[in-house]
Amino acid sequence: MWLHLQMRKAWKKLPAILTSLLVACAAFVASAPSDVELDEKAKVNHRLDSLNILLYTILLSLTVLTIWSFKHRRIRFLHETGLAVIYGLIVGAIIRYSYTSSEVSHLSVIPASGSGSQGGLNLTVPPDSLWLLLKKGPATLPKNKTYAYVFKGEISDSESKQIEQKATFDPEIFFNILLPPIIFNAGYSLKRKYFFRNLGTIFTLAFIGTTVSSVVIGAVLYGFVQVFGTSSEFSFLDTFYFGALISATDPVTILAIFNDLHVDVNLYALVFGESVLNDAVAIVLSSAIQNYGEKFSGENSGGFNFAAFSQSIGVFAWTFSSSFAIGGAMGCATAMLTKFTHVRDFPLLETALFVLMSYSTFLIAEVADLTGIVAVLFCGICQAHYTYNNLSRDSRLRTKQLFELLNFLAENFIFCYIGVSMFTFPKHHFDTVFIFAAFVAIIVGRAANVYPLSFLLNLGRKNKISWNFQHVLFFSGLRGAIAFALAIRNTLSEARQTLLTTTSVIVIVTVIVCGGSTTQLLSWFNIPVGVDDEAECMQIHMRSMYTPLDGNPKPDGSSADPYVEGGPPKPQDKALLARWWQNFDGRYMKPLLTHSRPTLLETMPVFCTPIARLLTTTEQLTQERVEPINTLSGDPTFAHFEGQDVRRLFP
Amino acid sequence: MWLHLQMRKAWKKLPAILTSLLVACAAFVASAPSDVELDEKAKVNHRLDSLNILLYTILLSLTVLTIWSFKHRRIRFLHETGLAVIYGLIVGAIIRYSYTSSEVSHLSVIPASGSGSQGGLNLTVPPDSLWLLLKKGPATLPKNKTYAYVFKGEISDSESKQIEQKATFDPEIFFNILLPPIIFNAGYSLKRKYFFRNLGTIFTLAFIGTTVSSVVIGAVLYGFVQVFGTSSEFSFLDTFYFGALISATDPVTILAIFNDLHVDVNLYALVFGESVLNDAVAIVLSSAIQNYGEKFSGENSGGFNFAAFSQSIGVFAWTFSSSFAIGGAMGCATAMLTKFTHVRDFPLLETALFVLMSYSTFLIAEVADLTGIVAVLFCGICQAHYTYNNLSRDSRLRTKQLFELLNFLAENFIFCYIGVSMFTFPKHHFDTVFIFAAFVAIIVGRAANVYPLSFLLNLGRKNKISWNFQHVLFFSGLRGAIAFALAIRNTLSEARQTLLTTTSVIVIVTVIVCGGSTTQLLSWFNIPVGVDDEAECMQIHMRSMYTPLDGNPKPDGSSADPYVEGGPPKPQDKALLARWWQNFDGRYMKPLLTHSRPTLLETMPVFCTPIARLLTTTEQLTQERVEPINTLSGDPTFAHFEGQDVRRLFP
C-alpha cells in the first residue's frame, strides 16, 4: 500500500526523475569533503597495517630461504629459530632508526568536568588517538602518566555502546586476512583452458560490463533518491560509488553449484571469469571514484570537472595495470625461486615460501596504494601456470589443499559475519526507500550489463552465447564478500552506513534467493549439465596432435601445458589474443620459468645462447623431473584429491 | 670492572642476602594492587576476545556439519553460503537481544584546553575507552557527535609516540592466533610411544621440576634485587611470577636438531615431554600466582597468608585438571563426530571440522577462564590418538600438513617478532643488574630442576638417566615463545616492562647460544645419534607378539595402536600408570571412539550389549575401513610426507 502510494507519487514526478537523471549523468557532484577525508584516513591506516604485516612476511620468507640454504649446506652452528631472531633484531634496528611512519594525528584530552571549553582544537576529522593526560590525576591512578587511546569509531546511539563491544571485527581483517586467500584460490584453481578460450568475452563483460552496470545503478539510484528523498544526503558520486561496489558479483555460490552439476564448461568459464574479474574491476573502479571525489572536494559546484574525471580514468588504468604487473612479477619471482633453488627438497619450506610470497604480493600492492585483490588474483594465475610445475609433488598437494581449506573457511566466515553483523554491527542505518531503490537498480544494472554486451559479443563470436546462457549470466549476479567488504570499510558518515546496510540486505537476499533457485533455473533453461571436462581433456591428451615449435611432434607429453592451456589450438574456439599469448608463453615464459621443454636454448635467437644456457637448468635438458603424469597434474584444476586423483599423483 | 665492584659489595652483604632469601621464601609479599587490577582488566578483555572468536568458530562448525548433511541428503534448495548467512542471522539476533557483555568502563573527555580540572573521576585503572564529546565542536567537525577511543597502552616517552604505531602487535594475537597451532601440533605430532614409556619421569620433571625451578629462580632473583636494588620495585610475588613464566622451556629449537640427528629416542621423549608439559605447568602456575596476588591485594602486610596460598594451590589443581578435561572431551567429541557421521566422504569438510573443533577447544578453555594451552595440548594428543584413525586418508594428510605448516610459520613469526620487538616495542625497560641476576637465577633454577630430580627418579627407573642425558636436559632449557608471550601480556607497570625486557634478552641469548651449540654438546656428551625409531617400530610390527584381549593373536594388524602406544608391553620399560592406561584404552576408549577391534560388544559386560551395539559401527564389525597400512599411518608421527612415506600412505 505504502509502496503503491510512493509509486503514484513517483509517476507524477516522472519528468522530474528523467531530468534529474540527465543532470546526474551529465554532471558529477562531489561527495561531502569530510566523508572523503575519512576515506583518506582509513586508507592511510590500512596502508600502515599492510606495511606492518608485509614486513613480517618478508622477514619470514627470508628466514625460510636461509633455513633452506643452511639445511642444504648442512650448516649447524646456527639454528633456524636463532636465525629468525637475528633477522628480527636487524630489521627491528632498521625500523627503529631509519623508517619514519606517516604522521599520526593525536589530541590531548582531559576528563570532562561537566561542560568543557574546546580551546585549540582545529581538526577536520577525528584524531587517530587521544592522549589522556593525568598531570594531577586522582589518588588511585599513578601520577604524570599519559595513556594512549586509538580511534574506534563513532557512537551512534546509547544502545550501541554495549553492542559495539560484541561480535564486530575490524574491517581491516576482511581485507588483510580473509579476502586474499579467497581471491588467490580463485586464480590458483582457475580452469585456465576455458578461461583463455573465452578471454575476449570475459574481459568485455568484466571491464565494459562492470562500468556500464556501475553507471546505470548509480544513475537509477540517484534518480530515486532525488524523487523520493532519503533520510541522508546522497551525491551522484555516492550512488555511483555504491554502483561500483555492488557490481562486484560473487562466484562462490553459483560455482559451487556448477561444480556439483558439472554444468557446461563454457558457461562455467563465462560466469567464473566474469565474476572473478569484475571483483577486481569493481574494487579499482570504486577507488578511482573516491580519488575523483578527493580531487574534486575543493570546489562544491555541481559542474562536471573534466580534468578530475580524466585523471581518475588514468588512476583506474594505472591501478589496474600496475596491480596486474605486481601480481605477475611476484608469481614469476616465485617460479624462478622454485626453479633455480633446490628448496623443493624440503616440501615444508617450499610450501611456506609459496604461501609467503603469494601473501606478500597482496601486501606489496596494498602498500603501494594499488589493489591487492587484483595483484593476488593474477599472482594466483601465475603460480598455477608456472610455479606449480616446479613444485615437489608434496608441495603441489599441500598448496592446493591449504588454499582450498583457507578459501572454504574464509568464505563461510564472511557469510556468517554478514549475517551476524546485521544485528550486532553498531553502525547500521536502515532506509527502506533506498533499499528498494537499490534492488531495482541492481536488476536494471545487471540486465544492462549482460544482454546488450552479449548481443554485441555474439556478432563476433563463432559459438554464440545462447539466450538461455544470457539468462543464467543475468541470474548468476549474486552479491557477496567483496561488495560487503568494500561497504563495511568506511562507515563513518551516515550515507556510508546506509550503503552498508543496503549492501548487507542485498547480499543476504541474493545469496539465499538466487543461490537457492539456481538448480531450478538451470533445468528451466535446460542448460547442459553432467559435462565432464576432464574426459574431454583426456581425449585431447590421447590424440596428442600438438606440434611443438621445432616442427617434429614431442617425444613425450612433457609439460602438458599446451593441453592445459587450451588443448590443440582450434582456431574456431580460440580468441586471437589467446593464440598470440600461447605462442609467446610456450616460446619464452614457460622455458624460462619452469622445467619444461623446449628450452630457451632452442627458442631464443642464437646470439642470446649464453644467457639462455644460464637460464636453463640441467633438469630441463635431461627431462629428469618431468613425468608424463605432469600432463594432468600440471594443471591444478585436475587434481581433486579424491582417491583416484591422489593415486594418480602418487603412482 | 663494574660487575667486580658489585660482586665485592655483594660479598660484604652476604648475610643480608641469606636472611632476605629466608624471609622471601618464608613470606609472600603482595604485588602492587594497581598491577593486579591491570592484570584483571587484561584478563577480562582477553576473555571477551576469546568469546567473540569462539562464537564464530562454533558457527563455522555448525555450518560445516549442516553442509555435510545437505550434501549427504542431496538437498539443493538452500546452498551452503545461504546456510552460513542464515546461521549468522540467527546468532546475531540472539546476541543482540539476549547476551549482555561485561560492563565496559568508559570516560567522557573533552579536548584539553591548557590545564583542566579532573572533576568526577574515580578510577583505579585507566578506562577501557574514552568518548570524545563534541557538543559544540569546531566548525570543521560535525556537531553533537561522540567518538569512541579504545585503550591502547601507556605512552612511556616522547619517542615511543611514533614507534608505538610501528611493527608492534596486540599481545592477544600471540595467545589467540599464534600459540594454539604450535601447542596443538606438539600434541598432535607427539611420539606417544616413548612419551608413554617415560610417563612418570616426564610428569615428575614437568610438575615438580617446574615448581622447584620457579621457586628457586624467584628466590635467587628476589635476593639479588634486595641486595643490589633495581630501578623498579619487585615484590617476591613478582620475582616468583617471573620464575614461573621463565621456567617454560621451549621445545622448538632442540627438537628440530634432535630430529635432524635422530638422537636417542628416550632422551628425545624426555626433552620433548618435559618442555611441552612444563609450558602448560608454567602458564597455569603463573596464573595461580596472579590469583594469589589478587586474593592478597587487600592487606599489604608482608605476612604469609596461608588461606590465599592454599587457595591458589587449589586454583592450580582446578585449572590444570579442568583444562585437561576440556581438551580430552573435545578430542573425544571430534572422534565421535568423525566416527558416527559420514563427513569423511567430503575430506575438505572433514578437515575444516577437525580444525574448527580443535581451535574451539582452546577458546572454550580461555572463555571458561582456564588455560587454553593445556586444553589444546591434550586435545591434540586425543586427536592424534583417536580421531586420526577415523579420518579419511586425504584428511590425515591435510591435517598433518596443515598443522605442520601453521606450526612452522607461527614459530618463526614469534621468533622474528621477539627480535623486532627488542627495538620497536615501546615499553622496554632495561635493567642490567636484573638481567644479570635473571641469568644466574635461571641457570641455578634449571640445575635445581634437573639434577636432584633425575637422581630421585633414577632410584625408581630401570634404565637410569645417565649423567650425559642429565647434562643435555640441563642445556636444553632454552626459553622461547611461551615465556615471551606470557611476559608481553601485561606491560602496564614498570616492573612488568622490566620482566618483558629480561625475558626477551634471555630468549634471544639462549636460543642463539644454546641452540647453536647443541650439536657440539651432543657429540661432547657422546649421545647416541642416528637412531631410527621407525626401524625399531617396524621390527615390533613384524614380530607382532601382541596378544589382544580376546586371547588369540590378531588376524591383521588392524588399528596398530598397541604398537603405537608402546609396542609389545615390555614391563621393564613401561611405567605402571602407562600399562594400566593402555589396558583401559584398548578395552573401552578405542572401541568407542575409533573403528578399531575389539569392539565394545566384546569388551563390555554382557548386560551393556544394547548400548555397545549402538556404539559399534558396521565398519567396525566388517573391518572394511582398516587396512594393514593403518598400523603405520595410525600414528601421525610416522608419516613424514617425504616421498616414500607418502607412497606408504597411498599404495
Image (cartoon, coloured by chain):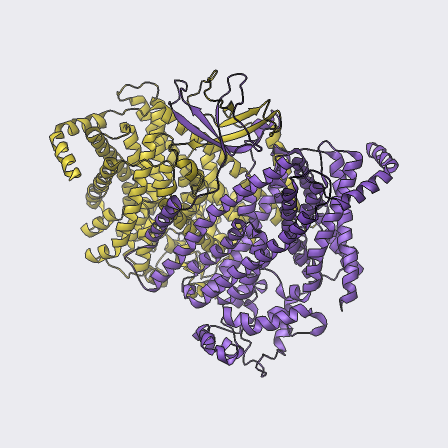
Chain colours: A purple, B yellow
Q: Which residue lies furthest to the bottom in this view?
A: A552
Front-lying residue, A243 or A233? A233
Where residue B530 appears, as percent x and y from the top left, is 28, 62
At x 14%, y 32%, the residue is B9
Q: Along the horizontal axis of the image, is B509 left or right of B379?
A: left
At x 60%, y 56%, the residue is A186
Front-lying residue, B6 or A43? A43
Vertical relation: A563 (above or below) B153: below
At x 39%, y 29%, the residue is B39
Vertical relation: B306 (above or below) B66: above
Q: Can residue A629 be seen in this view?
A: no
Q: Along the horizontal axis of the image, is A199 left or right of A347?
A: right
Q: Image quadrant for the N terminus of chain B?
A: top left
Where residue A402 appears, as percent x and y from the top left, is 51, 55
Where residue A32 appears, as percent x and y from the top left, is 66, 36
Where residue A209 appears, as percent x and y from the top left, is 72, 55
Q: Along the horizontal axis of the image, is A469 left or right of A47?
A: right
